[in-house]
Image: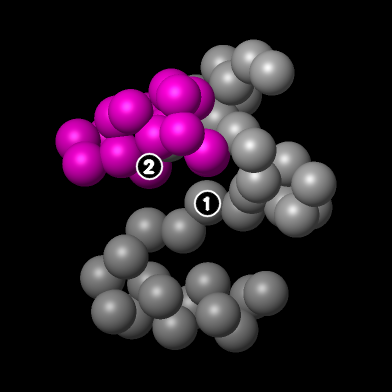
């Protein structure tokens, strides 16, 4: 995971750990991270993932 994170950082992308896979619903359609995906900062993405509700 750390290797991939460093590689993405080198490409200019910010990474946010959304593990484990069972939590991937937090970034799915209808969730805050999904609806704001084009305009959110890394900090906003972290907050939006935490704000997701089933």
Q: Which residues are magenta?
A: 27-44
User: How many residues crowd around disc 1 within 10 Å: few (fewer than 14), some, or many (20 or more)?
Assistant: few
Residue 17 inside the magenta-drawn segment: no
Is residue 48 something one can see in this rendering? no
Tell me, for residue 16, which label it has, or none: 1
Direction from residue 15 to residue 10 in the image, left or right: left
Colouring scheme applied when the structure was drawn? one colour
**For marks 1 and 2 on the same chain, the one whose residue lies earlier in the sequence:** 1
* Residue positioned 53% across, 72% down in the render: 5
Q: In the depicted view, which residue is nearer to us: 46 or 31? A: 31
**Label 1 secondary element:** loop
Name the residue nearer the viewer: 30 or 8: 30
Q: Is residue 16 above or below residue 38?
A: below
Q: Residue furthest front?
A: 29
Q: Marks 2 and 1: in contact by CB < 8 Å? A: yes
Query: Distance from label 1 to label 2 (Cα)?
Result: 7 Å
Q: Out of 49 and 25, give the one closest to the viewer.
A: 25
- Residue 18 visible in the shown view: yes
Q: Is residue 51 left or right of residue 30?
A: right
Instruction: Residue lying at the far left in this picture: please name it.
Output: 39
Please identify the quarter of the rendering in which residue 14 is found.
bottom left
Give residue 48's position: percent from left, percent from top.
Answer: 47, 25
Q: Is residue 1 above or below residue 50?
A: below
Residue that mark 2 sits on = 42
Q: Work out which quarter of the rendered image holds the C terminus and state it.
A: top right
The residue depicted at 49 percent of the width and 78 percent of the height is: 6
């Amino acid at each position: 995971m750390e290797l991939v994170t460093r590689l993405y950082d080198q490409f200019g992308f910010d990474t946010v750990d959304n593990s484990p896979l069972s939590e991937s619903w937090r970034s799915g359609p209808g969730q805050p991270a999904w609806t704001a995906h084009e305009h959110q900062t890394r900090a906003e993405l972290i907050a939006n993932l935490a704000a997701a509700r089933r």
